Image: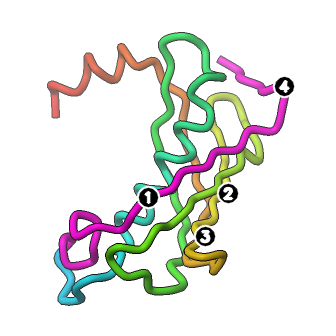
Amino acid sequence: MEISFDKKITGEQEMVVTENNSAKYFGSELDGILGTPALVGFMETTAQKSVLKSLPPGYITIGYEVSVNHLKIVKVGKTIKCITELIKTEGKKLFFKAIVTNNNDVIGEATLSQYLVEAAKVKRILPRF
């Protein structure tokens, strides 16, 4: 299946950094700051949500490749914002860029690759894992 989009697609979300997305939560000795795994997850979900309404019925995207730079520390309690942009598609592959900011300071940036799949097929194979 080839997918194309008629317009530029962007996504935007905000999130308050909590203990559940802190570096310590993911096993680090560092306490009270945003963990890189949470930063990546925030970027992935922002990208996914941005295209959801434009996908064919019954389809979702699944991330398969991320290149991320976590540039600055953000303390628990602070609000961060992610902006994503779909920059190209190739067949079922979607490519995004993402920038995460805190008070207009860039704290993270990434390129993300996601794959278009039928949700029902994914649900059928999940019990195998």
Q: Earlier in the sequence, mark 2 or mark 1?
A: 1
Q: Earlier in the sequence, mark 1 or mark 4?
A: 4
From the viewer's perspective, is the residue at label 3 or at label 1 nearer? Answer: 1
Q: CA distance from mark 2 to mark 4?
A: 18 Å
Hey, what amino acid is under mark 3? Glu
Residue 97: which disc?
A: 2
Q: Is residue 79 above or below residue 73?
A: above
Residue at screen point 36% across, 75% down: 34
Q: Which residue is mark 4?
A: 6
The percent position of residue 66, horizontal first and vertical second, equals 52, 59
**Horizontal arrangement in the rendering, residue 100 relative to residue 45 (left or right):** right
Q: Residues within 10 Å of mark 4 (few under 14, many from 20)?
A: few
Q: Which residue is mark 3?
A: 109
The percent position of residue 31, horizontal first and vertical second, equals 22, 85
Q: Is residue 39 above or below residue 53?
A: below
Q: Earlier in the sequence, mark 3 or mark 1?
A: 1
Stretch of the chain drawn in magenta? 1-26
Q: Are marks 2 and 3 in contact (CB under 8 Å)?
A: yes
Q: CA distance from mark 1 to mark 4?
A: 29 Å
Q: Which residue is mark 1?
A: 15
Q: Nearer the viewer, residue 59 or 45?
A: 45
Q: Earlier in the sequence, mark 4 or mark 3?
A: 4
Q: Is residue 96 above or below residue 28?
A: above
Q: Earlier in the sequence, mark 2 or mark 3?
A: 2
From the viewer's perspective, is the residue at label 1 or at label 4 nearer? Answer: 1
From the viewer's perspective, is the residue at label 2 or at label 1 nearer? Answer: 1
**Horizontal arrangement in the rendering, residue 57 relative to residue 120 (left or right):** right
User: Which secondary structure lies at badge 4?
Assistant: loop
